[in-house]
Image (cartoon, rainbow, N blue to C red):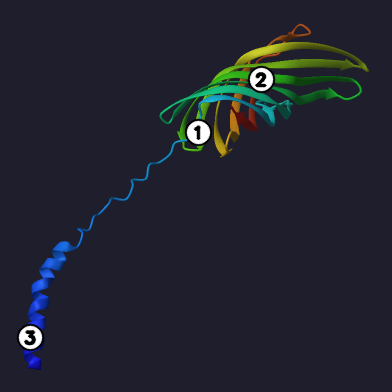
Amino acid sequence: MKKALLTAASLAALGMAPALAADLPARTYTKAPVAVATVGNWTGFYLGAMGGYAKEDAAFAPVSGGLAGGTIGYNWQTGAVVFGLEADAAWADLNSTAGIPGLVTATAKVQDLGTVRGRIGYAFDQVLLYGTGGYAWADTKLTATVLGLSASESHVLSGWTAGAGAEFMVAPKWSVKAEYLYRSFSGQTFFGVPSGNLNMNSVQVGVNYHF
């Protein structure tokens, strides 16, 4: 009797299993969301400060020294390509002296300099690598001293510049940059003597605020 009851219970359970399975809700599967890489947006105006070091590309008595100033610019981004226009101006203390001290000397100095440049680069999210080039100017002065008597003459030189740099967005609206520029200026006549071209290399760093 006991065996018969167990057998009947087993058969009943087997018969109910399909019905119970039919009543269970079907398992649903959802795909994980696809990760989309974000691209930083560099479009807009910016203001900044910059400073660096420059040295004349010359073998004899090259002018060299520091510079510091400000920057203003605008970027326009399409996809990962960034176009820009930038202007900077800097106070400079680039100088060199040649001659015989106390007898006759000539001191050349670059007092101010700046550029107006186009930029084109490629953005890797928060990193922008770019090339740049355009117009450059420099305010120069030559001082001649003979037996303690001095005379000076100043000219603003015009020329071109080209270089490359990298800019990094380090916080919302803030970026830092480092760049190299080669500058070439047409010569002028100082005290009736042609000076020849002034060519120099410069490296500078800066920080920009983006609006």
Residue 25 picture location, percent across and down = 21, 59
Precedes in sequence: disc 3 or disc 2: 3
Secondary element at tag 2:
strand
For the residues labelled 3 and 2, the Cα–Cα distance comes to 100 Å
Residue most toward the right?
A: 148
Position of the C terminus by quadrant = top right
Residue 71 picture location, percent across and down = 64, 24
40, 107: nearer the viewer = 40
Residue most toward the top?
A: 192
Residue most toward the bottom?
A: 1
Precedes in sequence: disc 3 or disc 1: 3
Residue 150 picture location, percent across and down = 89, 14
For the residues labelled 3 and 1, the Cα–Cα distance comes to 80 Å
Please name which of the two marks, 3 or 2, marks the residue nearer to the observer. Answer: 3
Type of amino acid at the residue the image marks with label 3: Thr
Does 165 appear above or below 160? below
Decide: marks 3, 2 in contact (CB < 8 A)?
A: no
For the residues labelled 2 and 1, the Cα–Cα distance comes to 21 Å
Question: On the image, numbered disc 3 is attached to which residue?
Answer: 7
Residue 202 picture location, percent across and down = 64, 29
The residue under the point 51% across, 29% down is: 42
Type of amino acid at the residue the image marks with label 1: Leu
184, 147: nearer the viewer = 184
Question: On the image, numbered disc 2 is attached to which residue?
Answer: 114
Q: Residues within 10 Å of mark 1 (few under 14, many from 20)?
A: some
